[in-house]
């Protein structure tokens, strides 16, 4: 209850201001594969995917139109320490893009096994429209 009172006082005095920079980030996961996302210029797109390393796969850098989106972050996150360990859990891949300009682009993430001679295969794709 005390936290709410302090927050109310800060809001009343103008110490805390609302974020007027526009809409919040759009967060996607593996289940969103094949979909379409609408963003506004300046808006962030966050993507969390399972790390496919358990099958010996490496991920290629994502492909997308760099005039429309900027890749701000790419990280390999470890498995969640709060959950029981699972065999083959290599954590998650985290991507963060910022919409730079109006337009449309696909984000494509391919995977490959270093010892295989076949071309990389598509792991994840989404269409992004920036307005």
Image: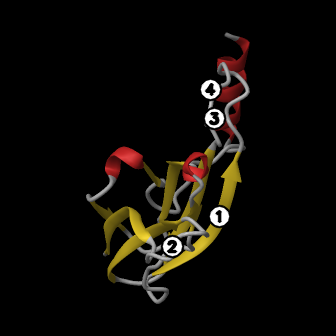
> Residue 12, labelled with which disc?
3
Q: CA distance from mark 2 to mark 1?
A: 10 Å
Which is more N-terminal, label 3 or label 4? Answer: 3
Q: Which residue is mark 1?
A: 74
Compared to residue 5, the image places residue 44 above or below, namely below
The reply to whether the C-beta atoms of the residues labelled 1 and 4 are less than 8 Å apart is: no
In this rendering, would 106 be left or right of 27?
Answer: left
Viewer-nearest residue: 109 or 82 = 109
Number of labels in the image equals 4
Whole-percent x and y of residue 90? 65, 42
At x 56%, y 72%, the residue is 60
Element at label 1: strand
Mark 4 vs mark 2: in front: 4
At x 32%, y 55%, the residue is 33
Mark 2 vs mark 3: in front: 2
Which is more N-terminal, label 1 or label 2? Answer: 2
Dot 4: within a 10 Å radius of its alpha carbon, few (fewer than 14), some, or many (20 or more) residues?
few
> Residue 62, labelled with which disc?
2
Find the residue positioned furthest to the top: 1
The reply to whether the C-beta atoms of the residues labelled 4 and 2 are less than 8 Å apart is: no
Quadrant holding the C terminus: bottom left
Whole-percent x and y of residue 127? 30, 69
Picture quarter containing residue 79? top right
Viewer-nearest residue: 21 or 65 = 65
Mark 4 vs mark 3: in front: 4
Q: CA distance from mark 4 to mark 3?
A: 48 Å
Compared to residue 47, the image places residue 74 above or below, namely below
Which is more N-terminal, label 4 or label 1? Answer: 1
Element at label 4: loop
Mark 1 vs mark 4: in front: 4
The reply to whether the C-beta atoms of the residues labelled 2 and 1 are less than 8 Å apart is: yes
């Amino acid at each position: 209850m005390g936290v709410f009172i302090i927050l109310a006082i800060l809001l009343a005095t103008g110490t805390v201001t609302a974020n007027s920079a526009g809409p919040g980030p759009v967060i996607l996961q593996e289940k969103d594969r094949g979909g379409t996302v609408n963003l506004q210029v300046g808006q962030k797109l966050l993507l969390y995917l399972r790390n496919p390393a358990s099958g010996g796969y490496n991920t290629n850098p994502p492909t997308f139109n760099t005039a429309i989106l900027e890749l701000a972050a790419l990280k390999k996150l470890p498995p969640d320490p709060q959950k029981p360990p699972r065999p083959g859990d290599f954590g998650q891949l985290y991507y963060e893009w910022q919409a730079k300009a109006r337009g449309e682009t696909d984000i494509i993430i391919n995977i490959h096994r270093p010892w295989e001679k076949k071309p990389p295969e598509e792991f994840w794709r989404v269409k992004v429209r920036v307005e």
